[in-house]
Amino acid sequence: MNDLISAIATGSGAAGVAIVRMSGALALETAKKMFSRKGEFTPNMMYAGVIDAGDFRDFGMCVYFRAPRSFTGEDVVELHCHGGTQIARGVLQRTLDLGARLAERGEFTKRAYLNGKLSLSAAEGLGEMISASSQAQVRAGYLLYSETLTGLGTALQAQLTECLAQVDADLDYPEEDLNAASRAQIAARLKGVEGELSSLVGQYAAGRKIASGVRVAIVGAPNAGKSSLLNALLGYERAIVSDIPGTTRDINEGTISLHGVNFLLTDTAGLRESSDAVEREGVRRAKAAIEGADVIVWLRDEAPAPAFPAGTPVITVGAKSDLARKKDCDVVLSSRTGEGLDALRALLYERGFGRENDGAFLLSERHVRALQQALAAVRAAQAAVNTCPPELYAEDIRRAWQALGAISGETANERVIDEIFSKFCVGK
């Protein structure tokens, strides 16, 4: 896989600089045919000169990274030209004319993985950073990219390897006393592994919110001030506001960022019985939004509280404080004056996401499935360690080890690997 690949590594369109990246054994030789420097290229040094694109020339820079001390683990050259669609395309085309082939999606990062420069989960973390829609997702992606999850998985695999080594000792020296002591040690190790796996799996709820946003349903009776609150939180007029009850009949949505986490706000139709078919449909959609919410903002009035889903945090709001609305609530506010909005934002973050989740990094369903499989296998081994022959619970331990290896890529199959890198852009 050391053939020469090339791609534009920067975004398209007008910009100050564009980068064309090559990776492979002939990267430097190809660059020498295009760049004006006559002497040798010292690795990691950037040189200024003229880039010959065949049909035109551009003043730019060139830098060479020698294998294996490069991102891909191969010889890598970057040509830095002026930004602009046609300049970058022309430089890229020249590399192709000289024998390179156009890189596939994520192929530079895939080569880095295949050459042992990073794990599979680290590559996924890099993808999360690139595609991030919030600062929290960037932070979580960086933790993956810095091998945090791989390190934890490898440490747990080491614990399981110790268990398997003790099983082998039991089989080789089956004296009764040694076997009983060994089983106790294995059971203790498995209990520790189970606890760490449970903790990691529990992170996924926060990770999903980081990746997809925290879903917030703003609910209440007609004319409770829901649309006004949505507009006040967003800072612009997203929803129509009227004194006429039942104005909102469909879902109005908007997104705000709190401490780098995206919160997806949904303004719903007023909850009441109605003979109007359109309004009834609006109420049905409101109830669906409530069922799918991570946190509910309820604008309280004189009516009893609706039946909210068990386990979903509810923030009770006394709205229209400038009109002397009820004040026995979590927060009292006025969408018109802005009173209480900061307090509501703080409650949204604490109850909808939680400051204890700031270090969460488990974003991928693939990761959580692997951890769940490992956890199930460890629990099966725990249940069997004191009652079954070593050969049987050793198989459960091996299943757990294999599941953890899928996180780093150690035991991942080719289909999974190809699917992961197909989500990257061409230049990465």
Image (cartoon, rainbow, N blue to C red):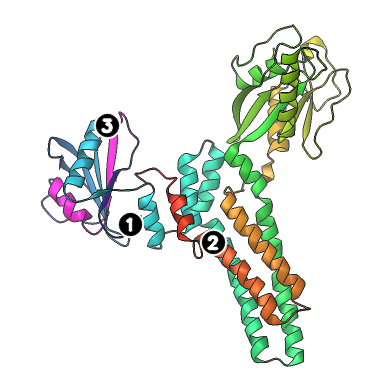
User: Do residues under tags 3 and 1 come within 8 Å of each other at their CB atoms?
Assistant: no
Determine the residue positioned at 67% across, 81% down. 391
Residue 148 part of the magenta segment? no
Q: Nearer the viewer, residue 132 or 39?
A: 132
Q: Quadrant of residue 343?
A: top right
- Measured in 3D between alpha carbons, the distance from the residue under mark 3 to the one under mark 1, in whole angstroms, is 27 Å
Residue where numbered disc 1 is placed: 70
Give the residue type that dot 2 points to.
Answer: Ala
User: Mark 1 falls on what kind of element?
Assistant: loop
Residue holding disc 2: 406
Residue 75 placed where, x, y %? 27, 58
* Residue at position x 39%, y 48% in the image: 106
Q: Horizontal placement of 128 versus 327: left or right?
A: left
Tell me if I can see residue 338 in this picture: no
* Closer to us: 209 or 401: 401
Residue 124 sits above or below residue 278 on the image? below
Compared with residue 220, is residue 191 higher up or lower down, i.e. above or below?
A: below
Residue type at tag 3? Thr
Specify start and end residues of the magenta stretch as a single range.
Answer: 12-35
Residue 219 at x, y percent in the picture: 75, 23
> Is-magenta flag for residue 17?
yes
Question: Which label sits on residue 85?
Answer: 3
The residue lying toward the viewer, choosing from 197 and 48, is 197
| Residue 3 visible | yes
Q: Tag 3's secondary structure?
A: helix
Q: Position of residue 253 (x, y in %)?
A: 62, 23
Q: Which one is closest to the eye, mark 3 or mark 1?
A: 3
